[in-house]
Image (tube, rainbow, N blue to C red):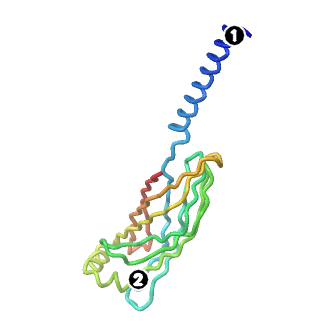
Amino acid sequence: MGIGKKKLCCGVTSIFIVIIVIVILTLAFTIFKPRDPIITLYPGSNIEVTSFLNPTQNITLDSIITIENPNYGVFRYKNTTSSVTFRGKVVGEAPIMDIYVPPHKKRNMTSPVAIMPVRLIQDPHFWIDVAAGTLNLTSTALMSGKVIAMNIFKRPATLYNSCNITVFILSKKSEAICESKLKV
């Protein structure tokens, strides 16, 4: 093989390697870039104000949490606890079990929320909010886990989640608006 053929072979190989590197970098910064999971909270309904009058007993509300993974990689996180606050004071907790969310899929899970009425009725704003007909709570959770792409790339990730929950006293219904931020 002559020197010209060796130079041509090295040149073609170099161009091929450069193209492969550019494709991998483009994929890493576009398609495989981790996106924030979408978390939807469906709080328990049929909340009775009279339940808060017995402060010795916790109130348990079943809530459904939906986690949607818009990524091309798997999101897996460990057990954690969500705190429910009223005007900055913790008034309840909800355990969140570990879960595996495949790429472009949704997972539902039920989580019992334990509300402590003693802490709620001690706040002077509680009865003002009840008289106004709405009770505003905030649920926050910090979920630590991993993002796994193509079963090769495993990166630790933390999901910060905050949900504003509004309980409508008269209709005994509730709704939540959640925001999530994934940090890899």
- The x, y position of residue 83, in whole percent, is 42, 72
Q: Residue at x 59, y 25 (%)?
A: 19
- The x, y position of residue 171, in whole percent, is 42, 72
Name the residue: 54% across, 38% down.
28
The circle drawn on residue 160 is none
Could you say which quadrant of the image residue 49 lies in?
A: bottom left
Question: Which residue lies under the disc numbered 2?
Answer: 116
At label 2, counting other C-alpha atoms closer than 10 Å, the crowd grade (few under 14, some 14-19, many 20 or more) is many
Identify which residue, 36 or 124, lies in the foreground. 36
The answer to which of marks 1 and 2 sits earlier in the sequence is 1
Task: Relative to 155, say whether 66 is above or below.
Answer: below
Name the kind of residue labelled 1 in the image.
Lys
Residue at 54% x, 52% y: name it.
155
Disc 2 on helix, strand or loop?
Answer: loop
How many numbered marks, from 0 up?
2
Relative to 53, residue 171 above or below: above
In the rendered image of this protein, does residue 167 appear above or below residue 24?
below
What kind of element bears circle 1? Answer: helix
Residue shown at the point (40%, 66%) measured from the top left: 165
Q: Does residue 32 sit above or below 135 in this rendering?
A: above
Residue 68 falls left or right of residue 8: left
Q: Position of residue 124 (x, y in %)?
A: 25, 81
Task: Kindly identify which numbered label has been placed on residue 5.
Answer: 1
- Whether residue 20 sits left or right of residue 46 in the image: it is right
Q: Nearer the viewer, mark 1 or mark 2?
A: 1
